[in-house]
Amino acid sequence: MKPVVYLLILLRASLFSTGGFGNVPILHSDFIDRGWAVDSQFAESLAIGQISPGPNGLWVISLGYLTAGLLGAGLAFVAICIPPLLVITVDRVYDRIKGRPEVDGFVTGLSLAVIGIFVAFLFGLLKGAGLSPFTITITLLSIALGMSKKVPVAVVLATAACAGIAIR
Amino acid sequence: MPSSSLLLRVWVSIGIQSFGGGIATLALIRRAVVDNNHWLTEAEFTRDWALCQIAPGINLIALAILIGKRLGGAKGIAVALLGLLLPSVAITVLLTAAYSRVQHTDAVRAALRGVVPATVGLGLATAINLARPILEESRRLGNPSLLTSVVLTIAAGLAVVVWAQPVILVLCVSGVLCGFAQLKLIGSKQSTGSQSL
């Protein structure tokens, strides 16, 4: 694995996605195809990204560390800092084209596709973990707790971890 | 313009406190920038956050860049990024390092049997929260619009996961399709509007 290629792949994923999880599907196909990561490493880094402070998008730092050590984490850090700089251009351009229906429509279509791909990816993750009454229950409970926004994410994950150990 | 050292202090304190993911981080930035220091008005903050939805990459990083630039130019951007990200990135690396030391023990394997579905559930909750405002907006525009949005979302997921199409291609096609749909929809609305005059 060449560091430059690794950085470019991470940059591309960040450049063509928006939001903390928008890059999940792109990176998933890139990393799995190249044999840089296995499915479980995605689940693990997403979980660590949820527990640690800051934007959820920092899960990429964790993926970088799991797949290429400190160098991977450093490259991931560089890769997530550069594309958002384009917000300055967006700021300038948007002033000129805001309110045009095709512009709003494009952004909507982009967001919907990101959501659809993300959901499909999550189902794949669940299937990989094994569909059982236990995993389905945990998934449904976590959806409810995640929607309510009352329980901190770290508490949900810690409880699920304890449940996993308890049913061993 | 606030001094760099004050800005750095504010961003670092946000970076350290922001346990609880993106929603907590956004709330902390808003409180610091709008409520406590009055660097931006509420309306300016809302507009900036909307622009960050369109910018590539992590929205919160884009927000830090935009606010950083408004408060201190290029230096402001550097201070915002370092202050917000260094503490959280360091903690993320430490957590991952700790995890990779223990990941092969039985207890961790067992714990993961619970953590993976929980991550999936939390991710689905995020997806629902992201989709809700868009779907409500399309319902407001009428049933054909809502149907288009739902079909587009499902088709995008299937295209990538089942039919193995490249993600970037699917994103672009979906954006262009929706752009045309919106143009037609608004265009026809405007023409019916002029007929009724």
Image (cartoon, grey):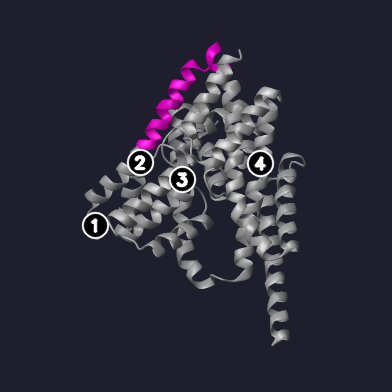
Select label 4 or label 1 by which is in front.
Answer: 4
Query: How many angstroms separate mark 1 from mark 2 (CA)?
Result: 19 Å
SS class of the residue under badge 1?
A: loop
Which amino acid, mark 3?
A: Ile
Label 2 marks which chain's residue? B
According to the picture, the residue beneath numbered tag 3 turns out to be: B23
- Report the residue at 46% width, 44% height from top: B22
Query: How many angstroms separate mark 3 from mark 4 (CA)?
Result: 20 Å
Label 4 marks which chain's residue? A
According to the picture, the residue beneath numbered tag 1 turns out to be: B2
- Report the residue at 51% width, 49% height from top: B57
Select label 3 or label 2 by which is in front.
Answer: 3
- Both on one chain, marks 3 and 4? no
According to the picture, the residue beneath numbered tag 2 turns out to be: B15
- The percent coordinates of residue B54 (x first, y second) are 53, 57
Label 3 marks which chain's residue? B
Which amino acid, mark 1?
A: Pro
Q: Is B11 left or right of A122, judged from the image as shown?
A: left
Category of crowding for the residue at label 1, using alpha-carbon neighbours closer than 10 angstroms: few (below 14), some (14–19), many (at least 20): few
Q: Is residue B95 magenta?
A: yes
Query: How many angstroms separate mark 4 from mark 1 (CA)?
Result: 42 Å
Query: How many angstroms separate mark 1 from mark 3 (CA)?
Result: 26 Å
Which amino acid, mark 4?
A: Val
